[in-house]
Amino acid sequence: AAPPDPHDFLAVDDSLSDEERDIRDTVRDFAARELRPHVADWFEAGTIPDPRSLAKAFGDLGVFGMHLEGYGCAGASAVEYGLACRELEAVDSGLRSFVSVQGSLAMTAIHKFGSEEQKNHWLPRMAAGEAIGCFGLTEPDSGSDPGSMRTRARRDGSDWVLDGTKMWITNGSIADVAIVWAATDEGIRGFAVPTDTPGFSANLVHKKLSLRASITSELVLDGVRLPGDALLPGSTGLGAPLSCLNEARYGIVWGAAGAARACYEAALEYATTREQFGRPIGGFQLTQRKLADMLVDVNQAGLTAMQIGRLKDQGRCHRNHVSFGKFACVAAAQRVASTARSIHGANGITLEYPVLRHMLNLETVATYEGTEEIHALSLGQAVTGISAFR
Ligand code: TGC
Ligand code: FAD
């Protein structure tokens, strides 16, 4: 047998079909051309300077809602969508987040629970990147326990009136439509809220040290009056938003594998070119141990993502598989990013190299879409049958 390729040690990508390989390469080329040259500046600036153009570019690339069928969406397989997330997050978690929130959260909510009119109105424009969506579940006092939300929607004649505050909402300040989850007399329901509705406002979150190439906002709903048809009719109960989260968490499984790979690649390159004591630092036993540890984490994360993707394409992916992947791959990526940063010495703390940027971003990735602890408890429940939550 041929010796393993240091860049795909377990030859995971050998199992890709021609179509899957094409999507991987198309997104990888786009990311190398359009994203990687700018992302350190965006991170330093703490924003995406021209999010409308970026949305249009993602729309042209075909990654918004690419796993959805119809309404201008590509109808791609789960593995194809995963590969796109992997290649985007290899550049920056914030860029994968942009795609996750648009496609896996906002568009998925409309696709799963919206009326035919809502789907026709929003999805083609969102797929094309001409309209931007956000997904408001978290509140200042309601994060891991979204069932405790205080945002209320009450009926007033045929209208609905929404009051409350959502917090930490990706793309909230630039969205055309906010998918807002609110408690009603009938339980938790979802609403498609056009962001120009009177009473709706969004405030940027400043001073983030993580996910800086991403826009994060507070949403304020102050007597927002909506016509009856703003309700997503199929959304009933907390299971509705949680089922959208499964889709975004699935993308994170792959994305984290991408961030891990990018940090390992950077460390391997650095270790073989940086010299101290008259030899490459990659020749020292301690550095080789670090590279071996990273190699294992990167390949195990890649395999985990691929297996969960194959299960999903076979219709066999349970939400506990997704929790397994989010828990395992994000933790692996955090270990790899931290080790990669150490191999880079002082250079590792700058934005000239990607490693600390990834390491900081991964703090968010470990927090959103269910914290590490929440997924650990979901796995504990899955194997014991006992819930530790309540
Ligand atoms: P629990 O009683 O367990 O469940 C309530 C109902 O929901 C159902 N369910 C799910 N359905 C689909 N998928 C899932 N993953 C589901 N988990 C639960 C469940 O069967 C039940 O249905 P029914 O019909 O019996 O009523 O609910 P709980 O209140 O005890 O909470 C469970 C817990 C803690 C696992 C859940 O609340 C949770 O996942 N918390 C974490 C919250 C979270 O992940 N928030 C993310 C906000 S969005 C975000 O972060 C976007 S960042 C995106 C980016 O930028 O990439
Ligand atoms: P808390 O729930 O208060 O948790 C604090 C700590 O307590 C954590 O360590 C947690 O694991 C632990 N904890 C809580 N409950 C338990 C328990 N039962 N057992 C053990 N430990 C526990 N939300 C959206 O709705 N839409 C978005 O677009 C979005 N984008 C985000 C973007 C960024 C940059 C960030 C940072 C967050 C975003 N979020 C978004 C919010 C995110 O989903 C929440 O931050 C996350 O769900 C955790 O909630 P919390 O921050 O309130 O932490």
Image (cartoon, rainbow, N blue to C red):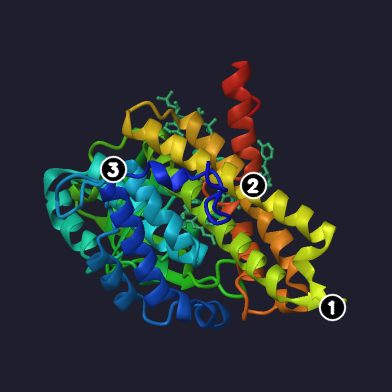
Q: Would you say residue 143 is visible in this rendering? A: no
Q: Nearer the observer, disc 3 or disc 2? A: 2
Q: Nearer the observer, disc 2 or disc 1? A: 1
* Residue kind at label 2, given as amino acid type: Asp
* Residue kind at label 1, given as amino acid type: Gly
Name the residue beneath numbered marker 3.
Answer: 77
Which residue is found at the position 40% from the left and 60% from the top? 221
SS of the residue under disc 2: helix
Which residue is found at the position 56% from the left and 35% from the top? 324
* Residue kind at label 3, given as amino acid type: Ser
**Percent of width and height locating residue 337:** 66, 60
Ligand 1: does it lie within 8 Å of the C-beta at label 3?
Answer: no
**Quick check: marks 2 and 1 in contact, CB under 8 Å?**
no
Name the residue beneath numbered marker 1.
Answer: 278
How far separated are the C-alphas under marks 2 and 1?
A: 30 Å
Within 10 Å of the Cα at label 2, are there few (<14), some (14-19), or many (20+) other Cα atoms? many
Within 10 Å of the Cα at label 1, are there few (<14), some (14-19), or many (20+) other Cα atoms? few
SS of the residue under disc 3: loop
Q: Name the N-terminal-most of marks 3 and 2.
A: 3
How far separated are the C-alphas under marks 3 and 2?
A: 25 Å
Which residue is found at the position 70% from the left and 63% from the top? 340
For residue 294, side relative to residue 309 (left or right): right
Q: Residue furthest top?
A: 385
**Percent of width and height locating residue 297:** 64, 47
Q: Quadrant of the C terminus?
A: top right
Q: Would you say residue 25 is visible in this rendering? A: yes
